[in-house]
Amino acid sequence: MATKPNTPKGTRDFGPVEMSRRNYIFDTIREVFALYGYRQIETPAMENLSTLMGKYGEEGDKLLFKILNSGDFMKGIDSGLLEGEPGRLAARLCDRGLRYDLTVPFARYVVQHREELQLPFKRFQIQPVWRADRPQKGRYREFYQCDADVVGSDSLLNEVELLQLIDEVFRRLRIRVAIKLNNRKVLAGIAELIGEPDKLIDITVAIDKIDKIGIEKVEEELAARGLGAEAISALRPMLKIDGTINERLRKLGEMLAGSATGNLGVKELQFVVDSTLALGLDATLDLDVSLARGLNYYTGTIIEVKALDTEMGSITGGGRYDNLTGIFGLPGISGVGISFGADRIYDVLGALDLYPAGLGSCTRVLFANFGAESAAVSARLVKALRAAGVSAEVYPDEVKMKKQIGYANNAAVPFFAMIGEDELAAQKVTVKNMATGEQTQIPFDGIVDFFAK
């Protein structure tokens, strides 16, 4: 018995309806990117592992899909390595991996094409990425990211612009969102003040899970990572700051007054918040001191967006990175970027029933097939309609009308056109509005004007 075909875990097929919805998301984001002056690039699906490894933290490195080397990949591998640490074996067998995100490949692109680029350089990418994660609701192994980044500028006005861009995208998609902010310098200042500056990575990885596992479990994880009870106790009030966003910033500034790094982070946050609110924002703007996003390359502002009206993880995230291109031999280029999670946005729009009506159909009018003469006339009219930019087609087979109308209904075609014997004699088309059932007769030479209106 043949095995039933299916997709790999954590991946999905998308049919015509799903693709029309996905393209609605991509087109909306692409239009806003262009409106804000971002230019599109693409990078390969695979990168050298040397490009990817060490950029996402220890946990991120474990989620990289690695690609076996071509040819006899086992040549020269001794049996001892087969029984040893899996990571060492993978390093010998694999030189390449599927990209984990679009930011690191973009940093590689900037360094590789530095002589061709005018800085600051504003780019966007809409491409799939892959993560060897455990599939669950809203989390897939293959998913699309829609990234916008600015490199070659230290100005915090870039952060302000990206927040405006985020707000515009979700305003157009009609999704109410909360934009959460933090700053890596604030996290570094906190680590410094609680006496654990060397454990910044341990602290950020743990506190980033507060929304998922709660503060008690986070404190247990911090203890397991080597933080003392006194340090954990000192950290607790910093994670529980309340009030309006400006009140939280004031309290945070007071707490971090003894740390130059932390104080600078608060000042950067204050500028971004004040400038953004002065321009106006539909989204809710919030400060979240626990927000770390788990990626080692962030050095300043950290951004995360969540939908307000349905349970879902982060649907957009990003931040400032000052040193990423330095890893590839080009220090001193600062960047800031955001990434829209298209697959999660897709699920949010579906859960909230926010897709525009008629997205599932690409054909505006379907001509019935009553036989060779009718089909020939219909084909000429379809050609004229297509030349005028109206999507039209002729049903290919001469079958019962019930089947042809059923096809139009299932394909969500709004108009059904009929040219039977009477219509051929009168040189007219009977057009049925599939939503209302109303029928109208249109002369052959008036059909383009009718549908072009």
Image (spheres, rainbow, N blue to C red):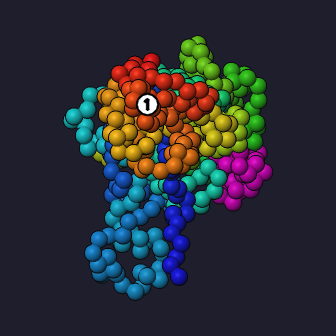
Provide the residue span drawn in magenta. 206-235
Residue 222 drawn in magenta: yes
Q: Nearer the viewer, residue 320 or 13?
A: 13
- Please, what secondary structure does the residue beneath circle 1 have? helix
Q: What residue type is disc 1 on? A: Glu
Horizontal side of 378 relative to 25 (left or right) equals: left
Report x, y in % for residue 432.
Answer: 54, 30
Q: Residue at x 66, y 29 (%)?
A: 176
Can you say whether 67 is above or below 121 in the image? below
* Residue lying furthest left: 115
- Read off the residue under disc 1: 423
Residue 311 drawn in magenta: no
Q: Nearer the viewer, residue 37 or 347?
A: 347
Q: Residue at x 59, y 15 (%)?
A: 280
The image quadrant of residue 377 is top left
Q: Nearer the viewer, residue 140 or 410?
A: 410
The image quadrant of residue 188 is top right
Where the C terminus falls, by quadrant?
Answer: top left
